[in-house]
Structure formats: C-alpha cells, structure tokens
Image (cartoon, rainbow, N blue to C red):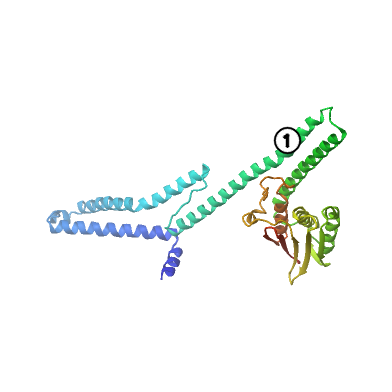
Amino acid sequence: MSKMSNKLNNRISLPIYFSLAVFFIFLITVVITGLLFYFARIFGLLNEHIAQDGTLLPVMTLIACTIIGTTISAVTSRKMVKSIRMFIEATDRLASGDFSMRLQLKSPPEFKILSENFNRMAEELGGIEILRTDFVNNFSHEFKTPIVSIKGFAEVLKNDDLTKEEREEYLDIVIEESARLASLASNVLELSKIETQSILTNKGWFNVGEQIRQCVLLLAAKFEKKNLSLNVNIQDYELSGNKELLNQVWLNLLDNAIKFTPEHGEIKVSMEKNEDSIVILFRDNGSGIHPEALPRIFDKFYQQDTSHSTAGNGLGLAIVNKIIHLHEGTIACSSTPSQGTTFTITIPNGL
C-alpha cells in the first residue's frame, strides 16, 4: 500500500501541487466566510437592511474573504518558504566550502528530487576536494624529494676531498634522482593527457600477444637482475585499440610485478579469448597488497608504502586504469599479503 502511495506522490507534479493548494485555500476561505455570515445572521449581527443592501454585503464579503484567505495563505505557505530558505542556506554553505551539508526535503515530490540531487552534488564535490588535496600533498612530496636529494648531493660534490668512488656514487644518485624527476613529470603529463580524453583515438587492429612478448623482452634485464622465473601463456590474438596506450599498460603491470616480487620469485602472464573479449592476467608471488589499501590502488599518487621508500610515484596504475576504461574494458586486482597479486584485464575484442 505504501509503495502505491509513493508512486502516486511521485506522479503529482509541482504545478498540480500548487493548483491543489490554491484550490483548498479558496475552498476553506469560502467555507469559513460562509460560516461567519451564517452565525452572524443567527446571532442578529446581520440584519435585513444589510442583507438587502446591494453594495454593503459584497464589500463585507470581499473584505472577509481577503482577510481569511490571506491568513490561511500565510500559514500554509510557511512550509514552502521554509523549504526554499533551507535550500538557499544549503547552497550558501556549499559555496563556502562546507561539502558536508545535506538536505532532507520530503515534499512536494520535485523538492525531494532537488534534495537528492543536491546531496549527490555535495558528495561528489566533497570527493573531488579530497582528491585535490591528496593530489597536491602527494605531488608536492614526490616532486620535492628528488629535488632536495639532487641539491644535497650536488653540494657534497663540490667538496674536493671526495674519493673517486664516492664521487661516482654521488653522481649515480644524482642521475637516478634526475631520472625519477623526469619520470614523474612524464607520468603527470601522460595522465593529464589521457584524462581529457573521452573517446579513444588512433584505433587499429594489432597482435596483442606479440605486443606483450615484446614488452617482456624490453624488461628482460630486470627479470635477470632479480633471477625471476617467467611463466608465459599468451596467444596471437587480434585486438582493436590504441596500440601505443596499451603498450604502456603491459609495461607498467610487468614493471610493477618485477618491483614487488622478491628475488627468485615467479611472474605469470596468461591470456584467454572469450566470445566478445580478451582476458589477460598478470600474476606475481610478491609481497601482495593489504586489504585496506586494495580499494585505493588506482588513485593518483597513492602508494601502499607510506614511507615512499619504494621506487615509483603512484601514477602508473592510475594511468593503466584510465587507458583500460578508454578501451571500454575493466581491470580488477586481487591480492593476499605475502602471497602475491593478480591483475585481471578484460577488453572487448571488437571495438
């Protein structure tokens, strides 16, 4: 029964709501005025002379209706005016930066919809503000750290008492930090570029299996350096997409797997083709991701290692996530601490 009444309320539009309100105000005004004249006639306040007067009675009726109607309208409109004032106050607070503000308007139906839309907007703006703050804080940290390091070691290198070995070591650190800074700038620019895209461009058919094999070869030195074993099960499947962007995805996921897999560990890459999509898995037996960190791994600049001691700037997975969504695909991550991580990418094979 309640569901039926809710549906009926939702069907009543704002104009009908106001029309009904005006009708009932008019009806109540007429009824009260009629009762007043009726009781006035009974108690002798309205004599025959006044009743037969063609001018006085209409004027008295008009005055009575005006006073009664205005009083009823003022009382009944207070709720409507109160709702509008609440909305004005809420928008003022929202404009001032208070994104915790919420509205709970229940009637008329349009005001309820307005309230729900306002709350959703406030929630989205609050989320954007948190992301903006996190972005600024993390970017400042990631950008400042290599600059401070370069400055410090550059000052040390001015010392003439350094041995050749020390000088070489410090120069290597300066080069490494410079590369890290350049990588950060490149990733920020790349993320900024793809975030402005809503439509995938430069699409074409290519052999995705061969592309992944080439990415493995590019990172062969890193595999050998950590003595990692590689278990690859990929086929020559054709995929429609942006070859350059997807190349970044495979390189990033492979590089992450190498980074977080201990020496003599194992990395698996597998692929299978479904009726309308291609599924690619990247699995490692590394340190894994903590359950609390798992929902945030695709956030910009987010790193599970809060000490920032691990190489990286927290932009890689954000870029990967955006590229996959541009291809109308999905990316999911499952992980168990100390056991490993699996990234599953699903991309439609007929864009």
Q: Is residue 3 above or below residue 172?
A: below
User: Circle 1 — which element?
Assistant: helix
Q: Position of residue 318 (x, y in %)?
A: 70, 52
Q: Residue at x 78, y 63 (%)?
A: 268
Residue 342 pos. (x, y %): 72, 61
Location of residue 152 (image quadrant): top right
Residue 290 as seen in the image, left or right of residue 8: right
Q: Is residue 16 left or right of residue 189?
A: left
Residue situated in front as seen by the camera: 2 or 248: 248
Quadrant assignment, res 37: bottom left
The residue closer to the viewer here, 204 or 34, is 204
Residue plotted at (75% across, 63% down): 281
* Quarter in which the C terminus is drawn: bottom right
Which residue ends up furthest to the right in the rendered image?
A: 164
**In the rendered image of this protein, does residue 26 appear above or below residue 302?**
below
Q: Which residue is mark 1?
A: 148
Question: Going by the image, does 297 lie left or right of 219?
Answer: left
Give the x, y percent position of residue 330: 69, 62
Residue furthest to the top in view is: 160
Q: Nearer the viewer, residue 211 or 181?
A: 181
User: Is 93 in front, or is 40?
Assistant: 93
